[in-house]
Image: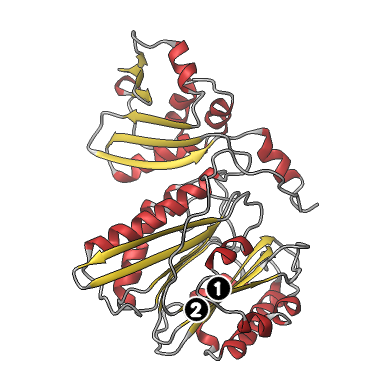
Amino acid sequence: MATIDHVSPLAPARFPELPEIAGARFATTEAGVKYAGRKDVMIAELAAGTVVTGVFTKSATRSAAVLDCQEKIGRSGDQGAAIVVNAGNANAFTGKNGVQSTKAVTNAVAQALDVPEERVFSSSTGVIGEPLPHDRITAKLADMAASLSPQNLPDAAEAIRTTDTFAKGAARVIQTSIGEVKIAGIAKGSGMIAPDMATMLVYIFTDAKIERAPLQAMLSELNEKTFNSITVDSDTSTSDTLLLAATGQSGVDVTEDAAFRAALHEVMLDLAHQVVRDGEGATKFVEINVQGAASEGDARTHALAIANSPLVKTAIAGEDPNWGRIVMAIGKSGAAADRDLLTIKFGDILVAEAGWVSPDYSEDAGADYMKAQTINITVGLGLGGFESTVWTCDLTHGYITINADYRS
């Protein structure tokens, strides 16, 4: 597997401070699943009464771990729960071996942490099609159980990385009318990123008190505006999983709390943006906003057509303000558009209007704008009142290098 020897130029200056979440403890280890000399397995122990919700990939070739999680996620229970994640092997397209490996790991975690097996949620990420050496994971669980700590979430963020160049974390602490609530989350993702639910692995923890149904509804709604609105390369993983666990330990009921919803949205969007900023080979963070669409679906279709176009993405990588490629992407998307109503902006620069280049547009101004690390592209369709925003990155030779060597 290719070695990543640099940090993305779009990475945050530092890993954020993550508050301890009452009722959640974490541990990591070097199991040698695929990587040598680095942590590659994490477990989370969740207190009795924890509510666990999630969204998962819609891929027809999803992994054994995803299928197992989907089967378990709707169950409720007052007992403890756990999450176990390994990096380096996706345990996908491995037939009966994959099912057996998932069961072996979840059973071993259940025994090590004294929680019901049906409350153990697993994820695997890495190479597809290779049997998971699950015995390397199960052999480490006793030591991991002995080292559980609420302070180990940053280590967990490190352990779930594959081609990521930096660990990803985000948190918010909010004051409600009846007390303080904490939210902390980690994510992994760099390539094989396209909207199909969560498009990576994400684990978010809160000490808030809330029943499963409203929390699941909140998560699903916010997911559409965050993780389902990013794309790096238009490819959807077999392993995409987003789990949100609410321990209830704060005693603060957030069922109808707008501040909690807003804070959860901020954490999810922060993590989603970090995934794009770590897109394999990325040098530009790109926001695409499509306005004036005839429907919300049309707006999203156009935005994704632009974001996923290799021609648009390579032009951005080359700092070429080639707005004709945006026109091309709109035309091919299949959603409603009228050439003679289009407007295009790069940041505050009006590039095109009424289906033609703006008379005030300067190619030099466009080229200067493209030198920035953050690029904002706005498209006006002039057909209605709907809009959509997606986030992506440029496409560079670095993406080819990483993925050509991925299994080496």
Residue 37 lies, in percent from the top left, at 77, 63
Left or right: residue 248 versus residue 149 is left
Tell me the residue that label 2 is attached to. Answer: 71
User: Contact (CB < 8 A) between labels 2 and 1?
Assistant: yes
* Residue 293 higher or lower than 346, as above or below: below
Q: Residue at x 69, y 78 (%)?
A: 101
Name the amino acid type tagged 1: Leu
Q: Is residue 182 left or right of residue 145?
A: left
- Residue 220, given in percent of the width and then of the height, sits at 36, 63
Q: Nearer the viewer, residue 241 or 48?
A: 48
User: Which residue sits furthest top?
Assistant: 359
| Label 1 crowd bin: few (<14), some (14–19), many (20+), radius 10 Å | some
Closer to us: 390 or 382: 390
Label 2 neighbourhood size at 10 Å, few (<14), some (14-19), many (20+)? few
Task: Please give the name of the residue rendered at 33% of the width and 73% of the height, measured from the top-left corner.
Answer: 208
For the question of whether residue 334 can be seen, the reply is no
Marks 2 and 1 sit apart, C-alpha to C-alpha, by 6 Å
Residue 154 in picture, x, y percent from top left? 55, 63
**Residue beneath label 1, please?**
67
